[in-house]
Amino acid sequence: MARHRLADRVVAEQDLGEGAFERVQASIDPDWIDEALQATGTATLRRRRLPAEQVIWLVLGMALYRNRPIDEIVAKLDLALPGRRGPTAAPSAVAQARRRLGEDPMRWLFERCSETWAHESARRFAWRGLALYGVDGTTARVPDSPENREYFGGSFGPQGDSAYPVVRIVTLMTLRTHLLAAASFGPYARSETIYARTFWPQVPDQSLVIGDRNFFDAKVLIPLASHGIARHWLIPAKSNFRWRVVRQLGPGDDLVEMKVSTNAHVANPALPDRWEMRAIRYERRGFRPRVLLTSLVDSERYPAAEIAALYHERWEMELGYDEVKTKMLERRESIRSRRPAGVRQELWGVGLAYNLVRLEMVRIAEEANVPPTRISFVMALRLIRDEWLWCAVAKPGAIPRHLRELRAEVLRFVLPPRRPQRSYPRVVKNKFSLYDPKPRAPK
């Protein structure tokens, strides 16, 4: 079978399982690829230079090798089947193969892999029996084509519309391994809360979701905490929130009652008139006092001081987004495709490729006996890139020795421990320009 051709070249000896890229390939069960193609009706029915199962690996290669043209990725990774017109496929054939595949198989495969990898890793690195997740949004630029501009739109301000169309992305991420558990994206004009609604039902039992104040929504959080077993949330309060103190649980720690808004009742008449939650006040040195609201109302089982410290793990999401944008996509125009369908296909591929790198980092952390956040994303990404290219051209008999040598240097991946209480307050930096700023109009 074509989908096994590259894998067969890698799995040359029994001890080849020590290699990072071979483990990456093994992480995606070949049956999952078959199921993705069959479930979405995109399986290749006749012999092609680039059958659908090989195009899936091409889309992953597009995410991992940002500095290479797409047709060069096909050639370097040896993805095209042998043909009469040369050793690789023509650029037009590559574009046609991507259009035939579409976005549905990549989405199906991302969701299947995320469900298996992310939730399992979140349970392994739980806090007081609760798997930790974060929810947050980001944006990515796409090529400025008429189709992308019309579908995705962009930001606008006093100086006009943004230079590029912008896609809005919202993800559910495991905070202690950075694996993506769910994702939703689309036009920039839609709010983050709308995209998040698609994956709230996927939050598992025995979990805690940490988000920013934008995600405080009674019609979402009340069902989240009341349905299932021990599904909790933790969100900072807005300055205009008002509540009634039911009883004091400790210093700066209250059980409070808040009125459910009229808008939430209109959307879901089954919601109660009032709902109880816990309000925890705390202050970090150099910062203003903050109030956290949470469904963790058991003060003995979930101490307030630990919850306040736990909230700051939400910033792991910012580090995860930085890994994708700065390290993996190399801060370039984030997405290559000039059509919305291609953008969506590519984004699912980026999410899946990022999870593959992160999954390998969890394995490296186990070998080094350190937390996954102590492993260098850059080093792991380079390892997988180098091994994939090397395995595509090397003789099978030489692969095991090469991979053993790479794995022997695992200590290169371990980062120093993070400094405690280190902070980076958010500030707005002035943009560099060779031109003088526009003078302000007189008042």
Image: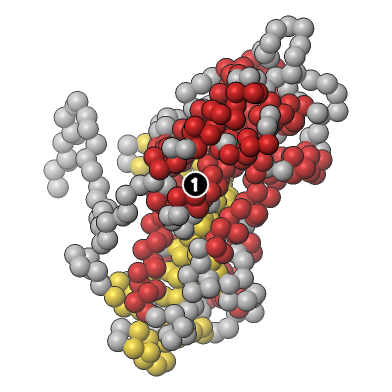
Q: Nearer the viewer, residue 12 or 103?
A: 12
Residue 391, by quadrant, is top right
* Count of labels in the image: 1
* Residue farthest along the top direction in this orientation: 85
Residue drawn at x 64%, y 64% as measured from the top left: 201
SS class, disc 1: helix
**Apparent side of residue 243 relative to residue 384 in the rendered image (left or right):** left
On the image, the x and y values in percent for residue 251 come to 30, 87
On the image, the x and y values in percent for residue 98 come to 68, 27
Is residue 170 shown above or below 201?
above
Answer few, some or many: residues within 10 Å of disc 1's Cα (few below 14, many 20 plus, some between 14 and 19). Answer: many
Residue drawn at x 77%, y 42% as measured from the top left: 31
On the image, the x and y values in percent for residue 169 come to 51, 47
Is residue 245 shown above or below 229?
below
Q: Is residue 85 visible?
A: yes
Q: Nearer the viewer, residue 2 or 226?
A: 2
Q: Nearer the viewer, residue 409 or 372?
A: 409
Q: Is residue 240 visible?
A: no
On the image, the x and y values in percent for residue 401 come to 56, 29
Residue drawn at x 65%, y 55% as measured from the top left: 115
| Quadrant showing the N terminus | top right
Instruction: Identify the colour scheme used.
Output: secondary structure
Residue 85, by quadrant, is top right
Amino acid under disc 1 = Ile
Is residue 131 shown above or below 75?
below
Residue drawn at x 27%, y 61% as measured from the top left: 420
* Residue farthest along the bottom direction in this orientation: 247
**Apparent side of residue 355 relative to residue 79 in the rendered image (left or right):** left
Is residue 396 shown above or below 204?
above
Q: Which residue is mark 1?
A: 364
**Apparent side of residue 199 relative to residue 208 in the rendered image (left or right):** right
